[in-house]
């Protein structure tokens, strides 16, 4: 995935993902759900959409959030997309291309879906590029953030409703250069997303006059004790830190950052996956004061977002995440594009996607850019206590970097 964000579902009670032997997703608590593991012929007057998200493995919590977001949109629109009843065929992306690529191929070749939505893992997304390009079927990426998806390996059949790693981090650079009076230390997990996140931040940070005190990449998925790295940060004399971590690593890093005594005197910044969803629940007060950039927060003070958050909480008994919003918006995009593709062909739908215009989203209005990526606002968020819990309060808007 663009950001391998493993939300700690054990710390977000009340929801589960159930997978049966056939790989079918079993939905609980969603009466009249349109999500199903259907196949074969498409019903007359219906449109068949493939939902490719992790239903098993370490990324299943993200898949659940995305599934919930997509389902909520259907529930709010009578189970229809573009005026046609939506038949959703769910497939398990698993943890990477070895499972995600054949699952997507089955959706297109056997289940005969009109389009596929989802994909958490960036390696899966890049591995599918040629297949969708040659099949002339639209793929709407609702999470994977690798820059190349809409950059060097762009295809007219691949669209993204989420983010590009370099953009979400670049949005923060100038703000940090303005706020911090002194050098900033850069630290991230040592894999492709970590390096893209740091590169995007560093580019705009240095362009705005910022100075780097040091740069370090920690072994991805293996680092539990951050003390040696935190000692290096202290020894560098940095006045602030920019970091990229997600999932369990984000929890450990933020907690140890405070325990080590850095949090009070050396502000911590990062991209929003550092404090998103179940990760923030697990960090608790240890994350207080952490500032991040992201294109969504439950705390956005708009009527559209308040309505969405209330509906999501009612349906799933928890707050939505950025992953849920990205999938929700994928449904919204299809809802707008499908009426302009009456023949249901990939070429018709691709042309229609290019003309959907602004999307009225809980994250704020956004639209597809020339690179078929989301052109959107990014927000400066700060972790604050609210009503006995911690939230990502929105403290400002950041300059978008395209």
Image: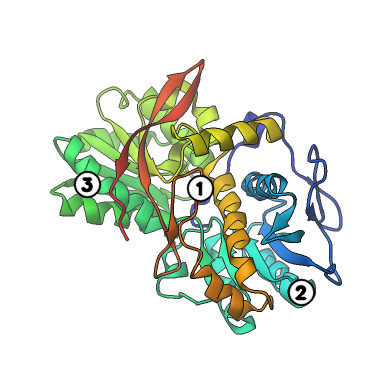
- Quadrant occupied by the N terminus: bottom right
Residue 361: numbered disc: 1
User: Is residue 376 toward the left or the right of residue 328 in the image?
Assistant: left
Task: Give the residue pinned by disc 3.
Answer: 174
Q: Earlier in the sequence, mark 3 or mark 1?
A: 3
Q: Residues within 10 Å of mark 2 (few under 14, many from 20)?
A: some
Mark 3 or mark 1, which is nearer to you? Answer: 1
Q: Position of residue 392 (x, y in %)?
A: 43, 31
Residue ID at (86%, 71%): 40
Residue 112: numbered disc: 2
Q: Position of residue 286 (x, y in %)?
A: 43, 24
Of all residues shown, which one is farthest toward the bottom?
A: 134
Residue ID at (48%, 24%): 390
Please state which of residues 48 and 144 is positioned toward the viewer in this rendering.
48
Q: CA distance from mark 2 to mark 1?
A: 29 Å
Mark 3 or mark 2, which is nearer to you? Answer: 2
Residue 248: numbered disc: none
Q: Secondary structure at mark 1?
A: loop
Please state which of residues 332 and 164 is positioned toward the viewer in this rendering.
332
* Cβ–Cβ under 8 Å for marks 2 and 1: no
Residue 124 visible in the shown view = no
Q: Residues within 10 Å of mark 3 (few under 14, many from 20)?
A: many
Q: Earlier in the sequence, mark 3 or mark 2?
A: 2
Q: Position of residue 372 (x, y in %)?
A: 45, 68
Of all residues shown, which one is farthest toward the top?
A: 388
């Amino acid at each position: 995935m663009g950001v391998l964000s493993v939300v700690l579902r054990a710390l977000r009670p009340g929801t589960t993902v159930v997978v049966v032997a056939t790989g079918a997703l079993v939905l609980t608590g969603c009466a009249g759900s349109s999500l199903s593991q259907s196949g074969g012929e498409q019903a007359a007057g219906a449109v068949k959409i493939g939902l490719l998200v992790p239903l098993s493995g370490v990324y299943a919590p993200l898949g659940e959030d995305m599934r919930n977001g997509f389902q909520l949109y259907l529930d709010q629109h009578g189970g229809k997309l573009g005026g046609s009843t939506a038949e959703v065929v769910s497939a398990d992306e698993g943890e990477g291309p070895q499972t995600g690529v054949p699952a997507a191929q089955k959706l297109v070749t056997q289940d005969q879906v009109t389009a596929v939505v989802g994909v958490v893992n960036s390696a899966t997304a890049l591995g599918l590029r040629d297949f969708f390009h040659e099949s002339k079927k639209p793929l709407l990426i609702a999470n994977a953030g690798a820059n190349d998806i809409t950059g060097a390996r762009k295809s007219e059949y691949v669209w993204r409703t989420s983010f590009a790693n370099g953009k979400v981090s670049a949005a923060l650079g100038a703000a940090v250069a303005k706020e911090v009076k002194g050098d900033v230390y850069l630290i991230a997990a040592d894999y492709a997303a970590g390096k893209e996140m740091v590169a995007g931040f560093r580019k705009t940070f240095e362009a705005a006059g910022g100075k780097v005190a040091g740069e370090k990449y920690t072994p991805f998925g293996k680092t539990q004790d951050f003390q040696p790295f935190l000692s290096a940060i202290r020894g560098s004399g940095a006045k602030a830190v920019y970091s990229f971590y997600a999932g369990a690593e984000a929890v450990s890093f933020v907690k140890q950052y405070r325990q080590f005594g850095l949090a009070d005197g050396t502000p911590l910044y990062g991209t929003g996956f550092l404090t998103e969803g179940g990760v923030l629940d697990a960090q608790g007060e240890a994350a207080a004061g952490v500032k991040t950039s992201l294109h969504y927060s439950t705390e956005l003070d708009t009527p559209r977002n308040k309505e969405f958050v209330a509906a999501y909480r009612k349906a799933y008994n928890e707050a939505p995440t950025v992953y849920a919003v990205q999938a929700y918006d994928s449904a919204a995009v299809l809802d707008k594009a499908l009426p302009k593709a009456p023949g249901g062909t990939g070429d018709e739908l691709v042309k229609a996607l290019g003309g959907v215009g602004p999307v009225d989203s809980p994250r704020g209005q956004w639209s597809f850019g020339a690179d078929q990526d989301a052109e959107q606002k990014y927000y400066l968020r700060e972790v604050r206590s609210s009503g006995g819990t911690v939230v990502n309060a929105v403290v400002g808007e950041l300059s978008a970097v395209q």
